[in-house]
Image (cartoon, rainbow, N blue to C red):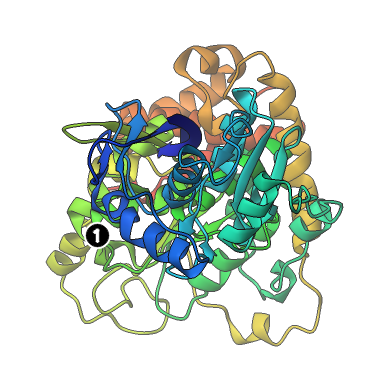
Amino acid sequence: MIVKTFGSALQGVHAITITIEVNVSSQGNKFYIVGLPDNAVKESEQRITSALQHLGMKMPRTRTVVNLAPAAIKKAGAAYDLPIAIGILGASEHIPADLFSGIVMMGELSLDGTLLPVRGALSMAMQAKTEGFSGIMLPQQNAQEAALVAGIAVYGAGHLTDIIQHFAGNASLVPVSSISNNSFISEQLFYDVDFNEVKGQQHIKRALEIAAAGGHNAILIGPPGAGKTMLAKRFPTILPPMQLEEALDTTRIYSVAGKLSHQGALISRRPFRAPHHGISDAALVGGGSTILPGEISLAHNGVLFLDELPEFKRAVLEVMRQPMEERTVTIARARQTIEFPANFMLLASMNPCPCGYFNHPEKKCSCSPGMVYKYLNRISGPLMDRIDLHVEVTPVTYVALSDPGESESSTVIRNRVIASREIQANRFKGFPGISCNARMTAAMMKTYCITDDSSRELLRTAMKRLQLSARAYDRIMKVSRTIADLEGSAYITTAHMAEAIQYRSLDRQTWGF
């Protein structure tokens, strides 16, 4: 007797429906799994056998063949235990086999039949709904996550017995109701830190406001203790709230990576990822024996903060160049190619020299000019070109630190950022995938970055004196467009252009000398 159940395989952040065909015949007594399974899938026989014995049931003592189709796709992990076990029980007539056609099932079995959580439940539920399945059965820990997808029944079970009883008609599993997302907006606006806690540093706050308003990359350069990390950690508090579609995209990435909490709530705030400088290139961009998203994908729709940028391995930094332009990362293997989204804002910080005190207003630097140049050159020119704003951070004076006055709050700054983003959203509403100035193409810049004669002459002079690259030219134009949007100006003036040019300080060969 041949019985079909349905599971799901992850390909990047997407899922592909897998048909599990189980054939139990009287010819022989061996167990076979075919369809390109990995070792974890092959080991399911032992887990299923133990789980059924714990329930007082037995595996068929006849020839059993399990086929995972399509066979061209590699099947990895122990999450196929549940659909294989139910298929075996259906083929051996322990439970009715005509109830499986509209249900996708995934779950790992422990030896006593307890269901263990799986990765990518949100993607699986989305795909099941797209293909017209009426429901999906998952471990209880994944049920709330999958229930974020409306229009499909999600059943959560804690034990194999629960599902057997459901199909046998002795007890029914009740579809899980999604946790209310009424608090979605309020959670986005609640942070433990705020810009009103930062004394002084007005020019740095201004630069970060511009970066947030236009979706620009930025680097903070200054001595130790000047507040670079403190300012970076407060940067997410001025970003515009995530839209529901963005939240679902980000949540799906965390689900595939196995980093989503079992409460199943949407990720309501923009991610802020801050990996250590010892990170490998595979951990940063994604990969591994089981291909998983890296830090740049976990920062999708949010911020990737690289503290002490020159301390990262050069090869690690260079692999970011293509994702920073394309907003996706493609991981190619001999048998498959996986694409992960990577639409992130890069925020970096660094000391100006090995000792950290080059260009300090009070402390003396112990580094020679050659050491300073060598330290700065740890960051390649092509990578620095892709960073829109170079912001010099100076130490805060005692007068500023002791000032009892209130600094501008994150809420006030965020409101200006949101207003600027609304201008950009209206401007780019006819261009799918373009939501802010940093994403403008060259053709769009000709249309929307309108300058006058004086601002063009200023930029021409800066390009010549600073020996800026063509990419730096594009960055200046985009940043000046954002500055104009913050002021509600339809045109880029000389003042907007001058402010944008000053944020290219690290392009100067004589910086700091």
Is 10 above or below relative to 477?
below
For the point 81% across and 78% down, which residue is it?
A: 405
Where is residue 437 drawn, in percent x and y? 58, 30
Quadrant of the frame with the C terminus: bottom left
Is 507 above or below relative to 127?
below
- Is 512 left or right of 376, judged from the image as shown? right
- Residue 272 found in image quarter: bottom right
Quadrant of the frame with the N terminus: top left
Where is residue 399 drawn, in percent x and y? 66, 84
Where is residue 380 drawn, in percent x and y? 22, 48
Name the residue that disc number 1 marks: 280
For the point 34% across and 68% down, which residue is it?
A: 308
- Is 186 left or right of 456, judged from the image as shown? right
- Residue 382 found in image quarter: top left
- Is 37 left or right of 436, judged from the image as shown? left
Q: Is residue 205 visible?
A: no
